[in-house]
Amino acid sequence: KGPSRRALTPTDFMATSRPRPYPVEEEPEFRADRAPPAAAPRGALAAGKASHLITATVAFFCVRFVSLPMCGHLTRALEAMWPAALRPYLDPAQDDTAVLMGCSALSAYLVVAVGLCSLLDCHPEAHRYKTQGHRSIFTWDQWTRAVAVGLSNILLFSWFATIPAWQLQRRGGGSGAWDTPLSLPNELACFAVHVVTIDVWFYVTHRALHLPLLYKWIHKFHHAFKAPAAIACVYANPIEFCVGNVGGVVLGPALTRCHPYAAAYWLAFALTSTSLAHSGYRAFGAEEHDAHHEHFSWNFGVGILMDRALGTCLPEGLRARGGEKIMKRS
């Protein structure tokens, strides 16, 4: 009688895989059994060719139909509970641009991550459109924990980054006046500055967070999801969230002092983009950042500028499914 066979567990895969950039004990805690990869759906949409257009359209929807109608309610709520000691630095009754920016970020997270992507994740058939397939399945406890951490970061901790940035924006003259006509060429130039700013800022802070000590104490928390879901896009240590995530997003409008509507759109675009990048769906452009969660030492940026400039784009030879070709970057 031959030796008995049992199904491989996640521990088996961690113990038998090739060397990784981090020790086995630092591997993410959530790992689903590896399932045979489904054939990747074909087509430009399924391959993520229209991901930027999808992000831009969804962000516009969030600002126009969610953030603007909700902003008045959020302003009244903040006025009622805002500490008097903070009013000299940010007054919800007067600094309506800052409130709209925060409202746009919150609405994008709720609509895209908590709503749209979570509904897609509930349908098993949708998993064939994910870069890591059925490894992206998560439990109800993981979902609720990710949403609780995400909302806590946005509602409670984000002010540690937004208030200093708003001071910088205010001292530079604030954003453009509400009644100032939007100049499309000017706002597109500002948007380009925002994109470059976040890519440089996020790359530098993200790369620093992968240093062993900072990874262990701060960034490992975010990498608990090796096959991430959209609701985990802001599942991070508050220090990482404020410095690495929010800091780079709000710095752009503080430097350009763009129109208030453009600033609100940028915040919605940034949260929509990071939600879709963590969703795992190829059509939403999640393949690059999903590869970072799977391989750790590649694709540190949110764009292609810094990764290409510094040689940290994931090589094509490491994109094989299943992890058989994971190796240390020399």
Image (spheres, rainbow, N blue to C red):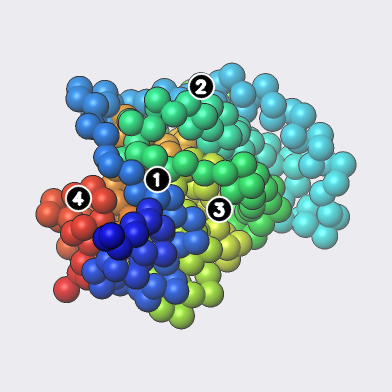
Coordinates of residue 72 in the picture (x, y in percent): 74, 28
Q: Earlier in the sequence, mark 2 or mark 3?
A: 2
Q: What residue is rendered at 34% in x and 59% in y?
A: 4
- Residue matched to label 4: 319
Mark 1 → mark 2, Cα distance in angstroms: 30 Å
- Residue matched to label 2: 61
Q: Is residue 100 above or below residue 57?
A: below
Q: What residue is rendered at 83% in x and 41% in y?
A: 79
Label 1 vs label 2, nearer the camera: 1
Mark 4 → mark 1, Cα distance in angstroms: 16 Å
Q: Earlier in the sequence, mark 2 or mark 4?
A: 2
The kind of secondary structure element at disc 1 is helix
The numbered disc on residue 77 is none
Mark 2 → mark 3, Cα distance in angstroms: 24 Å
The numbered disc on residue 235 is 3
Sort mark 4 into few (<14), some (14-19) or many (20+) by Cα contacts within 10 Å: some
Mark 1 → mark 3, Cα distance in angstroms: 18 Å
Relative placement, left or right, of 248 versus 94 is left
Q: What residue is rendered at 24% in x and 69% in y?
A: 18
Residue 101 seen: no
Q: Are marks 1 and 3 in contact (CB under 8 Å)?
A: no
